[in-house]
Image (cartoon, rainbow, N blue to C red):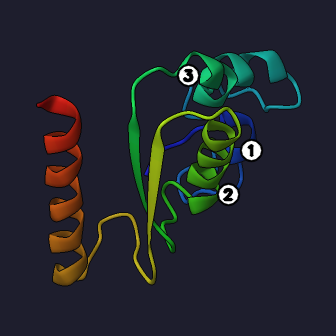
Amino acid sequence: MSISNWYSQIGTGDVSWGHSGIGSYREPWETPEKYLKHSPLTYVENVKTPLLMMAGEYDLRCPVSQSDQLFYALKRLGKEVEYIRFAGENHMLTKASNREYRTRHLVRWFEKYLK
């Protein structure tokens, strides 16, 4: 649940109308280099840490397409990444069963990579 590409985020999330989220009120087509500079996707080749990604399919704050873009790039580059999409969920994961599922995966991930 994050923004990976500020350029494509504009106009798609519920908080993108009226501000860019990167400290500028200029539009992406006016300063594309600024949006790309602040986008994690720009630096995806530098990722060295294994990454567990989780996203709610109906997240309006951080649209799932943002996670999809980052996951695609990481997989194409052969990076260690796992991606869990929660069907029918928003930004907050409202179903208790999904919150429990998320916690189990977080514990499993940390046990694997922090031991």
Q: Secondary structure at mark 3?
A: loop
Which mark lies nearer to you, 3 or 2?
2
Query: In the image, what residue occupies the spot 68% across and 39% down?
Result: 73
Q: Which mark is residue 8?
A: 1
In the displayed structure image, the side of residue 29 where residue 43 appears, left or right: left
Between 51 and 28, the one nearer to me in the picture? 51
Q: Looking at the picture, does residue 46 appear above or below residue 4?
A: above
Amino acid at pointer 2: Thr
Residue 41: x %, y % from top left:
65, 30
Amino acid at pointer 3: Gly
Mark 3 and mark 1 lie on one chain; the one further toward the N terminus is: 1
Q: Which residue is mark 2?
A: 12
Answer yes or no: do the residues labelled 2 and 1 have beta carbons within 8 Å? Answer: yes
Residue 45: x %, y % from top left:
64, 20
Residue 56: x %, y % from top left:
43, 68
**How many residues crowd around disc 3 within 10 Å: few (fewer than 14), some, or many (20 or more)?**
few
Q: Alpha carbon of mark 3 to alpha carbon of mark 1: how far?
A: 16 Å
Query: In the image, what residue occupies the spot 62% across and 54% down?
Result: 68
Q: Which residue is mark 3?
A: 23
Residue 21: x %, y % from top left:
54, 34
